Structure formats: C-alpha cells, structure tokens
Amino acid sequence: MSSTHTHSKKSQSLTKNQRIVLDLLQNSGEPLKAYFILDSLKKEGLNSPLQVYRALDKLVELGKIHKIESINSFIICNNSNCASNTAFTICERCGKVKEIKNKNLTDGVSDLVKDNQLEITRYNLEFYVLCKSCKIN
Amino acid sequence: MSSTHTHSKKSQSLTKNQRIVLDLLQNSGEPLKAYFILDSLKKEGLNSPLQVYRALDKLVELGKIHKIESINSFIICNNSNCASNTAFTICERCGKVKEIKNKNLTDGVSDLVKDNQLEITRYNLEFYVLCKSCKIN
DNA sequence: CTCTAAGTGTTATATTATTACATACGTAAT
DNA sequence: ATTACGTATGTAATAATATAACACTTAGAG
C-alpha cells in the first residue's frame, strides 16, 4: 500500500467505546436500548449512560447505526451506512423490527419527495405491521 | 333534536381531562410536550403527569392528535382524525413541525405499500427539512 | 513538538413515562 | 332503583431515557 495518502484515516477508525457499542449492536442484530447496552458493556469498562449515548450519537452520525424513535432503540444499519434515510417495519404484536431494504419503496419515496418539492434532508419512516409469525398465531 | 338515538353518545363526548388537553393542543397548533401541557393546565386542575399521559393516550387512540416520536411531542391532527397514518416535516434548524396533507404523497406511500406487499396497519413518516424561513436566513 | 479537535470519565440532574392502588363515574341490564 | 362493569380519576412513588457541567486525555495535523 502506498503511504502517500494520510488523509481521512481518522474517519475510518472508531474509538474504543464506539467500537464496543457498534460490535454489540452488530452481533445482536436487534434493536437495543441505551441502558441495556450500558449493562451489557459494564464488563468492557462502560460505567455511565453518557459514555453510551456519546458513542451512539457518533455512530448514528456516521450512519453505522439508526435510532428507531418510537421505541427509543438503536439498531445496526444493514444498508451499508445510510446516514440520512431510514425505513423500518415494527411488529405491533411482538415488537420485532426490520430495516426495509426494498429498493422500490425507498426509490419511490425519493420520487414522491421530488415530485412534491419537499426539500428533505433526511427521513425516518416507521411502518407498523403484523409480522408473519404473529399473523399465524 | 330527536331523542330516539341513544347509541354512540359516549364516543362523541370527551371527558374533562381529555377535553382540556385537546383544547390546548388545538389552540396551540404547535407540537407540545407532555410536561409543558401539565404546567399549562395546572390552573385547570391537572396535577400529575399521569393525568396528562392518560388523556394524550386516549386522544391519540381516537386519532384527534398525533405523537411525533422523534421529539416526544404531541400535535393536533389537521387531517380530520387520521388515527393510523401520519406524515410530518420537521425543520432541522428551528424545529417547526407541519403535518403533511399532500394527498399525492400519502396516496403514493399507500401505493408503494401495496406494491411491495407490506402489510401495514399504520405508519409514521418523519421528514426532516430546512423550512422556508430557515433557508432564507 | 505543539496546538487543536475530539473523545473520556465522572457526578449530578433533567426529562419523559409508567406502576400501583384506591376511588368515582356512567350506562346498561336486572 | 340497584347492581354490575368498564372506563376514568387522583395521588404518590418510581422507572426509564437523556443531558449538563467540568476536568482531563488522546490522536493527528502542521
């Protein structure tokens, strides 16, 4: 590798707190709450809510995770770092959350936004559903 | 007025607490926070958070108001009681919130939902924007 | 090396929301 | 009219979520 480019190294490397919070969310795959994260990472050295919230804020800013507002929870981004726009389904019965990757839907929303001349900087879409397993039972 | 129909009277009349909370939101037009509502209605006899939250819950259920999840606030519905589906713009700079009444947009979302076979019971769409006055300044 | 922006650790506190329990009210059936 | 039942009320306590303030440290650019 060339060593001539020194820029943007920082943007690639997370700090320790950011790393362990991200790893936890990655391994979980589910939405987690801040205080659950805190409890889970006590053994890794996290002691205060603020440490968690600071890491979460940064990760949201980087687009590596999303906040699901209606349940005060955070989930790993499975769309390769989409910082600005998010869309989820949330099961009304079991609470299970999925990030919507359906390109038709997100493209469609983008089109609608354009057509209606809404000057959107970002959006958060929360669709409440009855998930497959809950529908059966 | 005829007195022959006794049904569904209850569904039309709100209780006192529900009434005063709804009136406040109606007169304000802006999103208000639960504890602000509590403070504002102390003189009307509201003493505890629970009284406010119970009224708010009921009004949301009736579709008379909406909760804007990302700012923990409640706003009067200006779409004639749409209990299930909501769409807002939120200014990232000044925080101003508007309920989107644009029929094209909401119809479009409905179509997208159908096209993608998402079984949605309701949805909440929060679009972050830079509002006109903030864009100028 | 030094400066600076960003991150850390910690304590305290603010904000948002719910649990639990006893009481009252409204309406429909007896 | 009385009972029964679902809904609402009032109140105190507490849980859950999030931020402020401050002193200190670290990493990277110049």
Image (spheres, coloured by chain):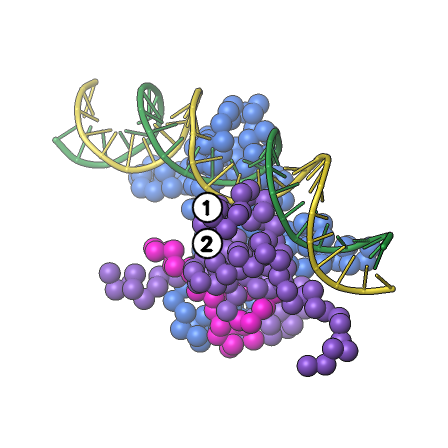
Chain colours: A purple, B blue, C green, D yellow
Name the foreground residue: A1 vs A88: A1
**Mark 1 crowd level (few <14, some 14–19, many ≥20, 10 Å Cα):** some
State which quadrant residue D26 falls in. Answer: bottom right
Left or right: where does residue B92 sit relative to residue A17? right
Q: Is residue A102 above or below residue B57?
A: below
* Subunit under mark 2: A
Q: CA distance from mark 1 to mark 2?
A: 11 Å
Give the residue pinned by disc 1.
A39
Q: Position of residue B21 (x, y in %)?
A: 52, 35
Label of residue A10 in the image: none
Name the foreground residue: D25 vs B79: D25
* Subunit under mark 1: A
Q: Is residue B44 above or below residue B89?
A: above
State which quadrant residue A131 falls in. Answer: bottom left
Check residue A81 for magenta coloring: yes
**Mark 2 crowd level (few <14, some 14–19, many ≥20, 10 Å Cα):** some
Q: Residue at x 42, y 46 (%)?
A: B61
The disc, 1 or 2, on the residue closer to the chain's N-terminal end is 2
Q: Amino acid at mark 1?
A: Asp
Residue segment shown in magenta: A79-107
